[in-house]
Image: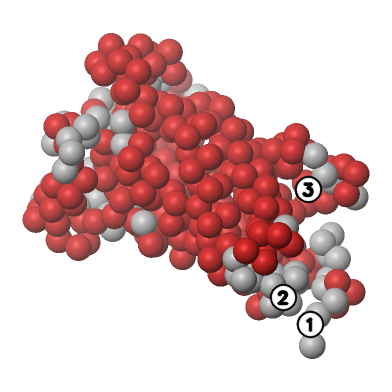
Protein backbone atom coordinates (compact mmCIF):
# COMPACT_ATOMS: atom_id res chain seq x y z
CA UNK A 1 0.00 0.00 0.00
CA UNK A 2 1.38 3.40 -1.01
CA UNK A 3 1.93 6.10 1.56
CA UNK A 4 -0.26 9.17 1.35
CA UNK A 5 0.84 12.75 1.81
CA UNK A 6 -0.61 12.71 5.35
CA UNK A 7 1.95 10.10 6.40
CA UNK A 8 4.87 12.44 5.75
CA UNK A 9 6.11 15.02 8.28
CA UNK A 10 5.44 18.68 7.36
CA UNK A 11 8.32 20.39 5.58
CA UNK A 12 8.80 22.91 8.38
CA UNK A 13 9.15 20.18 11.03
CA UNK A 14 12.43 19.30 12.73
CA UNK A 15 12.15 15.71 11.50
CA UNK A 16 11.92 16.79 7.87
CA UNK A 17 14.81 19.24 8.20
CA UNK A 18 17.14 16.66 9.78
CA UNK A 19 16.24 13.80 7.47
CA UNK A 20 16.32 15.89 4.29
CA UNK A 21 19.72 17.22 5.36
CA UNK A 22 21.03 13.68 5.87
CA UNK A 23 19.58 12.59 2.52
CA UNK A 24 21.13 15.57 0.74
CA UNK A 25 24.54 15.14 2.38
CA UNK A 26 24.65 11.43 1.59
CA UNK A 27 23.59 12.07 -2.01
CA UNK A 28 26.32 14.66 -2.42
CA UNK A 29 29.05 12.35 -1.07
CA UNK A 30 28.04 9.46 -3.33
CA UNK A 31 27.85 11.73 -6.37
CA UNK A 32 31.24 13.36 -5.74
CA UNK A 33 32.96 10.03 -5.17
CA UNK A 34 31.79 8.70 -8.54
CA UNK A 35 33.56 11.50 -10.42
CA UNK A 36 36.55 12.31 -8.16
CA UNK A 37 39.29 11.53 -10.77
CA UNK A 38 37.56 13.69 -13.40
CA UNK A 39 37.23 16.49 -10.87
CA UNK A 40 40.97 16.40 -10.15
CA UNK A 41 41.86 16.66 -13.86
CA UNK A 42 39.36 19.45 -14.44
CA UNK A 43 40.85 21.54 -11.63
CA UNK A 44 44.35 21.09 -13.09
CA UNK A 45 43.06 22.30 -16.47
CA UNK A 46 41.08 25.23 -15.11
CA UNK A 47 44.00 26.53 -13.07
CA UNK A 48 46.33 26.25 -16.08
CA UNK A 49 48.74 23.97 -14.19
CA UNK A 50 52.08 24.02 -16.03
CA UNK A 51 52.43 20.22 -16.08
CA UNK A 52 48.99 19.73 -17.67
CA UNK A 53 48.68 22.86 -19.81
CA UNK A 54 49.41 21.00 -23.03
CA UNK A 55 46.66 18.44 -22.43
CA UNK A 56 43.80 20.92 -21.94
CA UNK A 57 42.69 21.20 -25.58
CA UNK A 58 44.25 17.95 -26.79
CA UNK A 59 42.02 15.27 -28.32
CA UNK A 60 43.25 12.60 -25.93
CA UNK A 61 44.21 15.01 -23.17
CA UNK A 62 41.90 13.50 -20.57
CA UNK A 63 43.26 9.96 -20.85
CA UNK A 64 46.85 11.24 -20.98
CA UNK A 65 46.27 13.37 -17.88
CA UNK A 66 44.78 10.47 -15.93
CA UNK A 67 47.67 8.21 -16.98
CA UNK A 68 50.22 10.83 -15.92
CA UNK A 69 48.62 11.30 -12.49
CA UNK A 70 48.43 7.54 -12.02
CA UNK A 71 52.07 7.08 -13.07
CA UNK A 72 53.29 9.71 -10.62
CA UNK A 73 51.03 9.13 -7.62
CA UNK A 74 49.03 5.97 -8.27
CA UNK A 75 45.31 5.60 -7.53
CA UNK A 76 45.75 7.86 -4.52
CA UNK A 77 46.71 10.70 -6.85
CA UNK A 78 43.41 10.42 -8.72
CA UNK A 79 41.57 10.97 -5.44
CA UNK A 80 43.93 13.62 -4.04
CA UNK A 81 41.90 16.19 -2.10
CA UNK A 82 38.86 13.92 -1.99
CA UNK A 83 38.83 13.72 1.82
CA UNK A 84 38.50 17.49 1.98
CA UNK A 85 35.83 17.23 -0.72
CA UNK A 86 33.75 14.90 1.44
CA UNK A 87 34.20 17.15 4.50
CA UNK A 88 32.79 19.97 2.40
CA UNK A 89 30.20 18.23 0.27
CA UNK A 90 28.19 16.62 3.08
CA UNK A 91 27.23 19.92 4.72
CA UNK A 92 27.16 21.69 1.33
CA UNK A 93 24.72 19.26 -0.30
CA UNK A 94 22.72 18.85 2.90
CA UNK A 95 22.28 22.60 3.33
CA UNK A 96 21.55 23.06 -0.39
CA UNK A 97 18.71 20.55 -0.51
CA UNK A 98 17.26 21.63 2.85
CA UNK A 99 17.41 25.29 1.80
CA UNK A 100 15.78 24.49 -1.53
CA UNK A 101 12.89 22.66 0.13
CA UNK A 102 12.34 25.53 2.59
CA UNK A 103 12.75 28.42 0.13
CA UNK A 104 10.50 26.62 -2.36
CA UNK A 105 7.91 26.13 0.39
CA UNK A 106 7.90 29.89 1.05
CA UNK A 107 7.96 31.07 -2.57
CA UNK A 108 5.67 28.41 -4.04
CA UNK A 109 2.78 28.06 -1.60
CA UNK A 110 0.40 26.51 -4.13
CA UNK A 111 0.22 25.53 -7.80
CA UNK A 112 -0.71 29.07 -8.86
CA UNK A 113 2.70 30.25 -7.59
CA UNK A 114 4.55 27.46 -9.45
CA UNK A 115 6.35 29.60 -12.05
CA UNK A 116 9.73 29.00 -13.67
CA UNK A 117 10.99 32.25 -12.17
CA UNK A 118 10.16 31.13 -8.63
CA UNK A 119 11.67 27.71 -9.25
CA UNK A 120 14.88 29.33 -10.54
CA UNK A 121 15.04 31.74 -7.59
CA UNK A 122 14.48 28.90 -5.10
CA UNK A 123 17.45 27.00 -6.51
CA UNK A 124 19.65 30.10 -6.66
CA UNK A 125 19.01 31.09 -3.05
CA UNK A 126 19.61 27.51 -1.91
CA UNK A 127 22.95 27.46 -3.72
CA UNK A 128 24.05 30.78 -2.23
CA UNK A 129 23.09 29.62 1.27
CA UNK A 130 25.14 26.42 0.99
CA UNK A 131 28.19 28.21 -0.45
CA UNK A 132 28.25 30.81 2.33
CA UNK A 133 28.50 28.08 4.98
CA UNK A 134 31.06 25.82 3.29
CA UNK A 135 33.31 27.96 1.07
CA UNK A 136 36.56 27.65 3.10
CA UNK A 137 36.39 23.85 2.73
CA UNK A 138 35.97 24.28 -1.04
CA UNK A 139 39.14 26.41 -1.20
CA UNK A 140 41.13 23.83 0.77
CA UNK A 141 40.06 20.93 -1.46
CA UNK A 142 40.97 22.88 -4.63
CA UNK A 143 44.44 23.54 -3.21
CA UNK A 144 44.86 19.85 -2.39
CA UNK A 145 43.84 18.88 -5.92
CA UNK A 146 46.17 21.46 -7.51
CA UNK A 147 49.42 20.32 -5.85
CA UNK A 148 51.23 17.63 -7.86
CA UNK A 149 54.36 15.49 -7.52
CA UNK A 150 55.08 12.13 -5.93
CA UNK A 151 57.27 13.74 -3.25
CA UNK A 152 54.85 16.54 -2.58
CA UNK A 153 51.78 14.87 -1.13
CA UNK A 154 49.79 17.61 0.58
CA UNK A 155 48.17 17.15 3.95
CA UNK A 156 44.93 18.80 5.00
CA UNK A 157 46.38 20.59 8.04
CA UNK A 158 49.48 21.75 6.15
CA UNK A 159 47.43 23.29 3.34
CA UNK A 160 45.09 24.93 5.86
CA UNK A 161 48.06 26.50 7.66
CA UNK A 162 49.59 27.65 4.38
CA UNK A 163 46.38 29.44 3.38
CA UNK A 164 46.12 31.07 6.79
CA UNK A 165 49.59 32.65 6.54
CA UNK A 166 49.74 33.50 2.86
CA UNK A 167 49.63 37.28 2.98
CA UNK A 168 51.98 39.64 4.80
CA UNK A 169 49.86 42.32 6.46
CA UNK A 170 52.77 44.55 7.41
CA UNK A 171 51.84 47.03 10.11
CA UNK A 172 48.67 45.10 10.84
CA UNK A 173 50.80 42.62 12.79
CA UNK A 174 50.79 45.00 15.74
CA UNK A 175 47.03 44.52 15.99
CA UNK A 176 46.52 40.76 16.42
CA UNK A 177 42.71 40.94 16.27
CA UNK A 178 42.63 42.69 12.90
CA UNK A 179 45.43 40.48 11.61
CA UNK A 180 43.49 37.34 12.57
CA UNK A 181 40.38 38.60 10.78
CA UNK A 182 42.41 39.45 7.67
CA UNK A 183 44.06 36.03 7.69
CA UNK A 184 40.67 34.33 7.83
CA UNK A 185 39.78 36.26 4.67
CA UNK A 186 42.41 34.14 2.89
CA UNK A 187 39.88 31.30 2.99
CA UNK A 188 37.52 33.37 0.84
CA UNK A 189 39.68 33.80 -2.25
CA UNK A 190 37.33 33.82 -5.23
CA UNK A 191 34.22 34.03 -3.04
CA UNK A 192 32.63 36.92 -4.93
CA UNK A 193 32.91 35.21 -8.31
CA UNK A 194 31.63 32.01 -6.69
CA UNK A 195 28.44 33.80 -5.69
CA UNK A 196 28.15 35.20 -9.22
CA UNK A 197 28.46 31.69 -10.62
CA UNK A 198 26.34 29.77 -8.10
CA UNK A 199 23.29 31.97 -8.68
CA UNK A 200 22.75 30.86 -12.32
CA UNK A 201 24.19 27.37 -11.75
CA UNK A 202 21.99 26.33 -8.82
CA UNK A 203 18.96 28.14 -10.20
CA UNK A 204 19.24 26.53 -13.63
CA UNK A 205 20.03 23.09 -12.18
CA UNK A 206 16.93 22.97 -9.99
CA UNK A 207 14.75 24.57 -12.67
CA UNK A 208 15.91 22.12 -15.35
CA UNK A 209 15.40 19.19 -12.97
CA UNK A 210 11.87 20.33 -12.11
CA UNK A 211 10.96 20.87 -15.78
CA UNK A 212 12.39 17.49 -16.78
CA UNK A 213 10.52 15.82 -13.91
CA UNK A 214 7.28 17.48 -15.05
CA UNK A 215 7.94 16.22 -18.58
CA UNK A 216 8.43 12.62 -17.45
CA UNK A 217 5.30 12.83 -15.28
CA UNK A 218 3.22 13.69 -18.37
CA UNK A 219 0.77 10.79 -18.98
CA UNK A 220 1.57 10.67 -22.70
CA UNK A 221 5.31 10.47 -22.03
CA UNK A 222 4.78 7.82 -19.36
CA UNK A 223 2.78 5.69 -21.77
CA UNK A 224 5.46 6.09 -24.44
CA UNK A 225 8.15 5.04 -21.96
CA UNK A 226 6.02 2.19 -20.55
CA UNK A 227 6.40 3.57 -17.02
CA UNK A 228 2.78 3.80 -15.88
CA UNK A 229 3.03 1.29 -13.02
CA UNK A 230 3.20 4.02 -10.40
CA UNK A 231 1.60 7.36 -11.22
CA UNK A 232 3.46 9.24 -8.49
CA UNK A 233 7.00 7.90 -8.92
CA UNK A 234 9.28 8.10 -11.93
CA UNK A 235 11.36 5.23 -13.22
CA UNK A 236 15.05 5.10 -12.37
CA UNK A 237 15.90 5.95 -15.99
CA UNK A 238 13.64 9.03 -15.94
CA UNK A 239 15.08 10.28 -12.64
CA UNK A 240 18.67 9.89 -13.84
CA UNK A 241 17.88 11.62 -17.15
CA UNK A 242 16.24 14.55 -15.36
CA UNK A 243 19.34 14.91 -13.19
CA UNK A 244 21.67 14.70 -16.19
CA UNK A 245 19.78 17.49 -17.99
CA UNK A 246 19.98 19.59 -14.83
CA UNK A 247 23.75 19.09 -14.73
CA UNK A 248 24.29 20.03 -18.39
CA UNK A 249 22.17 23.19 -18.14
CA UNK A 250 23.73 24.36 -14.90
CA UNK A 251 27.29 23.69 -16.04
CA UNK A 252 26.87 25.44 -19.40
CA UNK A 253 25.46 28.67 -18.00
CA UNK A 254 27.99 29.06 -15.17
CA UNK A 255 31.24 27.56 -16.47
CA UNK A 256 33.19 30.80 -17.18
CA UNK A 257 32.62 31.85 -13.56
CA UNK A 258 34.01 28.51 -12.39
CA UNK A 259 37.21 28.90 -14.44
CA UNK A 260 37.84 32.37 -12.97
CA UNK A 261 37.08 31.13 -9.47
CA UNK A 262 39.59 28.27 -9.69
CA UNK A 263 42.39 30.61 -10.78
CA UNK A 264 41.64 33.00 -7.94
CA UNK A 265 41.61 30.14 -5.45
CA UNK A 266 45.10 28.89 -6.30
CA UNK A 267 46.71 32.34 -6.47
CA UNK A 268 48.55 31.91 -3.17
CA UNK A 269 50.17 28.64 -4.24
CA UNK A 270 52.46 30.40 -6.70
CA UNK A 271 53.11 33.45 -4.51
CA UNK A 272 52.17 33.99 -0.88
CA UNK A 273 51.18 37.59 -1.57
CA UNK A 274 49.40 36.87 -4.86
CA UNK A 275 45.75 37.72 -4.17
CA UNK A 276 44.15 37.74 -7.62
CA UNK A 277 41.27 40.03 -8.52
CA UNK A 278 38.47 39.04 -10.88
CA UNK A 279 39.27 41.66 -13.53
CA UNK A 280 42.92 40.54 -13.64
CA UNK A 281 41.92 36.89 -14.03
CA UNK A 282 39.48 37.73 -16.85
CA UNK A 283 42.12 39.76 -18.70
CA UNK A 284 44.89 37.18 -18.34
CA UNK A 285 42.60 34.30 -19.33
CA UNK A 286 41.43 36.11 -22.47
CA UNK A 287 44.99 37.18 -23.31
CA UNK A 288 46.36 33.65 -23.01
CA UNK A 289 43.63 31.67 -24.79
CA UNK A 290 40.87 33.96 -26.00
CA UNK A 291 37.22 33.09 -25.34
CA UNK A 292 37.94 29.37 -25.31
CA UNK A 293 40.09 29.95 -22.23
CA UNK A 294 36.87 30.46 -20.26
CA UNK A 295 35.68 27.01 -21.33
CA UNK A 296 38.87 25.01 -20.78
CA UNK A 297 37.95 21.62 -19.35
CA UNK A 298 34.26 22.00 -20.28
CA UNK A 299 34.19 18.58 -21.94
CA UNK A 300 35.41 17.07 -18.68
CA UNK A 301 32.88 19.27 -16.94
CA UNK A 302 30.09 17.59 -18.88
CA UNK A 303 31.56 14.11 -18.36
CA UNK A 304 31.74 14.88 -14.67
CA UNK A 305 28.53 16.83 -14.20
CA UNK A 306 26.14 14.47 -15.99
CA UNK A 307 26.78 11.46 -13.71
CA UNK A 308 27.33 13.63 -10.63
CA UNK A 309 24.11 15.67 -10.77
CA UNK A 310 21.97 12.79 -11.99
CA UNK A 311 23.31 10.59 -9.18
CA UNK A 312 22.85 13.39 -6.65
CA UNK A 313 19.19 14.03 -7.45
CA UNK A 314 18.47 10.31 -7.78
CA UNK A 315 20.08 9.35 -4.44
CA UNK A 316 18.44 12.34 -2.72
CA UNK A 317 14.98 11.35 -3.98
CA UNK A 318 15.44 7.70 -3.05
CA UNK A 319 16.96 8.57 0.34
CA UNK A 320 13.99 10.77 1.21
CA UNK A 321 11.66 7.90 0.37
CA UNK A 322 13.77 5.50 2.45
CA UNK A 323 13.71 7.90 5.42
CA UNK A 324 9.94 8.25 5.12
CA UNK A 325 9.71 11.96 4.29
CA UNK A 326 8.71 11.70 0.62
Classify the position of the N terminus by image quarter.
bottom right
Which residue position holds label 1? 2
71 to 324, vertically: above or below = above
SS class of the residue under badge 2? loop
Report if residue 140 is visible in the image: no
User: What's the image's color scheme?
Assistant: secondary structure
Report if residue 131 is visible in the image: yes
Which residue position holds label 2? 230
- Camera-nearest residue between 79 and 312: 312
The Cα–Cα distance between marks 2 and 3, rounded to whole angstroms, is 25 Å
Q: Where is residue 90 in the image (x, y as percent from the top left)?
A: 53, 59
- Camera-nearest residue between 179 and 196: 196
Q: In which quarter of the image is residue 242?
A: bottom right
Q: Mark 2, residues whose alpha carbon is within 10 Å: few (<14), some, or many (≥20)?
A: few
The residue shown at (62%, 71%) is 226
Q: Mark 1, residues whose alpha carbon is within 10 Å: few (<14), some, or many (≥20)?
A: few
Which residue position holds label 3? 104
Amino acid sequence: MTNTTENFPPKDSREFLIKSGIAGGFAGCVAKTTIAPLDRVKILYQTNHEAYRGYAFSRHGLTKSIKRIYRISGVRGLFQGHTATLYRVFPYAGIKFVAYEQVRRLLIRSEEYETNGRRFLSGSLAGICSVCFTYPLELIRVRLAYITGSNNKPKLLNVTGQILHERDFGSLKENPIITSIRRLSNFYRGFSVTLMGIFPYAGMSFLAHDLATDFFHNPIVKRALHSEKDERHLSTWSQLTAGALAGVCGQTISYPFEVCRRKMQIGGVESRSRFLKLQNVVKSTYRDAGLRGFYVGLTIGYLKMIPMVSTSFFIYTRSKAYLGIS
